[in-house]
Image (cartoon, rainbow, N blue to C red):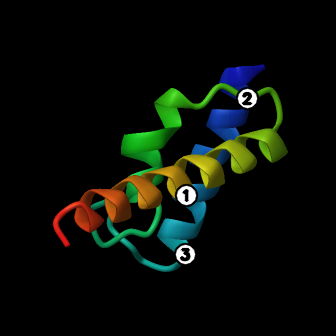
Amino acid sequence: MINEVKERRINFITKISKKRRWDFGDGNPYFDEVFNHMDKIEAKTLRIYKRKLKERKKNERNRIIAHFNKFK
């Protein structure tokens, strides 16, 4: 079931990337999700997956901001 959620998400990302003619490199907005976050998220439903993804991105942004605030 967990793999099903990730497979559905990959299919969606592939479909939208082809539709918008994005290559799968750094310029693709989903690149970070697939290569940095997807393998670390365990979720049974797509809704839970998206919630955990949003939390991970928020936490990552906060860590970056805190790192640079140390140097002020």
* Amino acid type, mark 3: Lys
Q: Secondary structure at mark 1?
A: helix
Q: Position of residue 32 (x, y in %)?
A: 39, 54
Q: Is residue 3 above or below residue 61?
A: above
Give the labeled residue for mark 1: 58
Report the mark closest to the observer, 2 or 1.
Answer: 1
What is the spatial separation of the Cα atoms under label 1 and label 3, in whole angstroms?
Answer: 28 Å
Give the labeled residue for mark 3: 19
What is the spatial separation of the Cα atoms under label 3 and label 2, in whole angstroms?
Answer: 27 Å
Considering every residue shown, the one lying at the far front of the view is 72
Q: Secondary structure at mark 3?
A: helix
Q: Earlier in the sequence, mark 1 or mark 3?
A: 3
* Amino acid type, mark 2: Ala
- Image-based side of 11 in relation to 71, left or right: right
- Image-based side of 27 in relation to 1, left or right: left
Residue 12: mark: none
Which residue does the image show at 74% across and 49% down from the upper left? Answer: 51
Which residue does the image show at 65% across and 25% down from the upper left? Answer: 42
Q: 19 and 30: which one is in front?
A: 30
Q: Earlier in the sequence, mark 2 or mark 1?
A: 2
Q: Position of residue 24 (x, y in %)?
A: 33, 60
Disc 3 residue crowd, few under 14, some 14–19, many 20+, Cα 10 Å: few
Label tally? 3
Disc 2 residue crowd, few under 14, some 14–19, many 20+, Cα 10 Å: some
Give the labeled residue for mark 2: 43
**Which quarter shows the N terminus?**
top right
